[in-house]
Amino acid sequence: MKSILVGIVGPSGSGKSTLCKTLVSESDKYEHIKLDNYFKDPETFPIMEGFKNWELPSNLKFGELIRDLETLKNGQEVHTKSFPNKKGAEAEPITLKPKQVILIEGFMLFKNPELRDMLDIKIYLDIPTEIMLERRAIRFGADHVNDYDTKVAIPEFLKYGITQKDDADYVVDASRKQLEVIQEVRRIIDSALNPKSPFNSIQDK
C-alpha cells in the first residue's frame, strides 16, 4: 500500500486538529500527525514583547518529522511521544501507523522546503485574524492571554504563516461551518485517491 501525505496548514483556530480528528474517526484509512508534537525545548525559544515566542519555524524539529514520515512511507510503524503543552502534563507514547492517507497538520508545516516537497497534497485553511482571536480565546479559556495573541501570535503569523498560502495546492475557506470545511477537504483527498472517478461532480449529502 502506497501512502499519500496530506499537509494541513492554517493559523491557530482554523480547525486543523478538529478536521483531522473527524476524518480519522470516519475511516481507518487515515493516520493523524500533529506538528505540535515536534516542538523543541521551549527553554530555547526567543522572547518577544516579554513573551516566550512559540510562533517560529525554528522552534520545530522538522528533521525528526521528515524521518518519521519516511519510515511510515516505507510501511513501518513509528514510536514517538506527545509534546506536553499544558502545565503539569507529561509526554505520552504515540504509535503512528502506515495508513493509506497520512494527515500532517501544523501552523508552520510548509516552511520547511524538504518537508513541503514530500507532501502529495498541500491544503491551507484560511480564516481572518478576528476569527483567529475569537477561537483562540475559546480554545485556551482561563489560560488565554490576549496580549500574547495581539503582540506575538498574530504578528508572527502574518510574517511567517500566511505566506504559506502561496505554497498550497488548495486554499479552503475555514470561516464556514465546520461540516462544510470537512466535506471539501474530504472531496480533495478522495479525488486524489480516485483520480478517474467522477467524485468531484458528486455533492455530499
Image (cartoon, grey):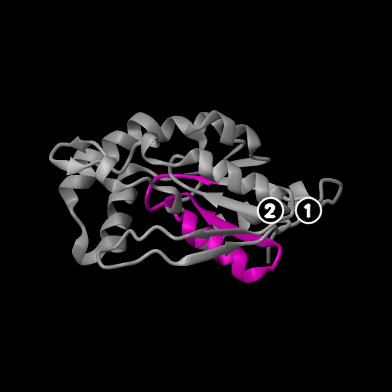
Mark 1 neighbour class, 10 Å CA radius: few under 14, some 14 to 19, many 20 or more: some
Report if residue 143 is visible in the image. Answer: yes
Establish if 113 lies above or below 22: above
Establish if 39 lies above or below 100: above
**Residue 115 locus on image (x, y percent):** 57, 36
Amino acid at dot 2: Arg
**Sequence-first disc among 2 and 1:** 2
> What are the residue bounds of the magenta stretch?
8-36
- Residue 75 picture quarter: bottom right
Residue 75 or 166: which is nearer the viewer? 75
Task: Give the residue displayed 13% in from the left and 40% down from the top.
Answer: 50
* Left or right: 135 as drawn, with respect to 196: left
Q: In which quadrant is the N terminus drawn? A: bottom right
| Residue at the spot of label 1 | 199
Task: Give the residue displayed 67% in from the left and 52% down from the top.
Answer: 72
* Left or right: 176 as drawn, with respect to 130: right
Q: CA distance from mark 2 to mark 1?
A: 7 Å
| Circle 2: element type | helix
**Dot 2 and dot 1 residues touching (CB under 8 Å):** yes
| Residue 27 is a magenta residue | yes
Q: In which quadrant is the C terminus drawn? A: bottom right
Label at residue 156:
none
Amino acid at dot 1: Phe
Q: Residue furthest right?
A: 196
| Circle 1: element type | helix
| Residue at the spot of label 2 | 187
Report if residue 177 is visible in the image. Answer: no
**Residue 145 locus on image (x, y percent):** 18, 54
Residue 117 or 37: which is nearer the viewer? 37
Task: Give the residue displayed 36% in from the left and 40% down from the top.
Answer: 59
| Residue 160 is a magenta residue | no
